[in-house]
Amino acid sequence: MTRLRKDKIEHSRRRFLIGSVGSGLLMAFAPSINALEVVTGGASEQLVAKSFSPTVWFEIDTQGKILVNIARAEMGQHVGTAIARIVADELGADWNNVEIKHVDTDPKWGYMVTGGSWSVFQTYVPMSQAGAAGRTVLIEAGAKLLGVNPKDCSTHNSHVVAGDKSISFAEIVKNGKIERTFSPEELANFEPKSPASRQLIAKPSQALDIPAKTNGTAQYGIDIELEGMVYARPVIPPTRHGSKVTSVDDSAAKSIKGYQGYEILNDPSDTVQGWVTVLADTYYAAVKAGNAIEVKYDLGETANVSEQDIISQGETLAKDKTSGTLVVEKGDIAKAAQNAKTSLESVYKTSSVLHFTMEPVNAAVEFKDGVCHVHCGNQWQSLFLPVVAKAVGMSDDKVIIHQYYLGGGFGRRLAGDYMIPAALTAQAIGKPVKLVFTREDDTRFDCVRSPSVQQMNAYWDDDDKLLGIEHGAAAGWPTMAMAPAFMPEGVDKKGKFDPFSIAGADHWYTLKNHRVRAINNPLAQKTFVPGWLRAVGPGWTGWAVESFMDEIAHKQNMDPIDFRLSMLDASGKNAGEAPVSVGGAKRLAKVLTDIRSQTNWGQTLPKNQGMGIAISSGQERDMPTWGACVAHVEVDVESGKVKVHKITGILDCGTVVHPDGALAQTQGSMLWGLSLALFEGTEFTKGQVKDTNLDTYTPLRMNNLPDLDISFVQNTEFPTGLGEPGLIAVAPAIANAIFNAVGARVRDLPITPEAVLAAMPS
């Protein structure tokens, strides 16, 4: 996914336009400059013509209100607040005058995706530069109106200030005709404010979206009502791929009040195969009709696939040292294995995991004036807009996705597959359609986090010195399923791989010999659509890496923290580089050292209690958020049940732009890490997930909440992501704590009481 990030960090060669338009002041990035492009007219003229494709577009009106348009999805992480604070701080704005707006898929907003913990990371530099350019222009215009030298001016609380003179942004917009274009080189000269001069960044604040969410005015996708719309509910086929409808019997549904019939969907995009939607004038009637209608199918080839079938194929693939695509190849692991005096082999597994967002997926669609309007909450509009267009046989410019708050995303809404049946149904009946999935529909249609199998091997020489580690990870790949163009070549150039499904295995420990293989599990790939779920690959690669590092430490009779520190020497590629990973593995060593002190590591605990350590460098190596986690657990040796008393987490994400949002995100991600460790997981039976509602799928409940102690390293380094890193180290920290408590080494997620008892030393 590096293609999605590169121009956000290095910044593409775009000019920045600032101009008086109507009664306000608009600021936006111009289109990228290239040899084929001819741009005419001044900044105001171009802004009026909307000949721009910004990462940001903000405006100031004559009342001094500052509107920041946000192209990122809001799903509880308060992304709009974080982005707006970057702009407002550089402008010198009064935070009380700042508003945000989440925009639709008009091409002028540029490429739209919210995931990977990228939002602040990607936008920090361009937002800072845009705000600084805006400040410069406001100072120039304000100085002219005040009759002072711009060099004597600064901005504060939406005023340009020069000594005892000041003028508000509102007055400047009213009275100053502004026309200014900044070249890419001029923009590049603007550096983010020094920490000492910041007024908003890294300071406590209330998120701008909280009032709407608490007073009921916030609109989620499921809230949308379209004039004259019909409700629809899908009938989910027995397999995700390959099922074909042979007959439909709706005789039982005809007696349901409000039932309006059904549609058999033909999808040119092949997103939904073997689908029927039922129609009604109310949601309740649609739900009842969906239960009453009988559909018969020719089944897809995966109709009898089980979870164990997928795991077994993963085990075979992971054990085969020739399988997969090489992602890391340092030294000569084959020679190390051949010359090893001793070795250690472990296999780690994770089960299928579901998203269970609070708001089941839904979409409302209407065709109006030759345009397909899709109303929903989505995380990757730019990926699925072309899919919608293909499904309904229209060009991309005739499809608009209108964005709303997401009642939970967690990666599920990176896919926009739920838009397709709504669009096809609306097109078929010639009326607006609101398609809402029940919880069971939503679950059966989920883009599941694939079950995984990981083969870990370590080798020692005659002097008991660690020679190297080999790691093979087999799973279904979401990027292969939904965005194959973003799959890079392996290091040996012999195949492509899904970076999301192996990130975290390319860790920051220094090893003389290290090999990592990313292995696609084809049975998983064709049984369901593998999905991105919070933390994605590191949710399972971190499980294996950090559990195995603990095994190695104990085999070498070393304290697990001392062992890790000995491997975090920041040499070679692990030294890090500017701007995003300055310090490299030394910063990972620091959080590890800090957490040792903070948790009083090594303290004497009561019988059957233990503490475990794990570390993480975040979701991706080229966007590291350094983290350490210590779990304090107690094991009931009679039942095998594990109680987590406390989770301590320290994270270094560079500059913490929005501290309240950072803490909330990390609390949520660490608790989900606990949920995945002990409680969450389903299995495939006959090609479908077994658990379809929260009566049998049992995530973390309130009575199992531990104490949380979360802190952030205070520094001024480049800000990296926080949406996902907190989750990664929790499960291995718990597993390592279980081992320290009762000597049971568990290697499967979720960790069940039965597995703990089975692993107990006899």
Image (cartoon, grey):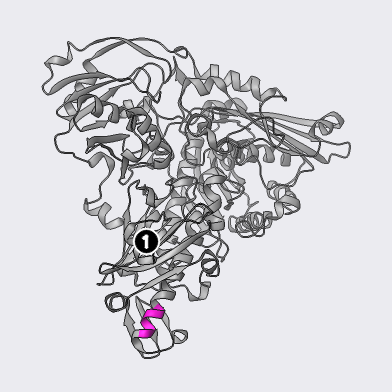
Dividing the image into 4 quarters, which one contains the N terminus?
top right
Magenta span includes 141: yes
What amino acid is at disc 1? Gln
- Magenta stretch, main secondary structure class: helix
Where is mark 1, residue-wise? 46
**How far from the left and from the top, in percent, is residue 694?**
35, 30
On screen, residue 81 above or below 327: below
**How far from the left and from the top, in percent, is residue 319?**
69, 23
**How far from the left and from the top, in percent, is residue 540?**
57, 35
Residue 653 appearing in the image: no
Magenta span includes 365: no
Dividing the image into 4 quarters, which one contains the C terminus?
top right
Residue 594 appearing in the image: yes
Left or right: residue 248 compared with residue 123: left
For the record, the magenta segment spans: 139-144
On screen, residue 407 above or below 593: above
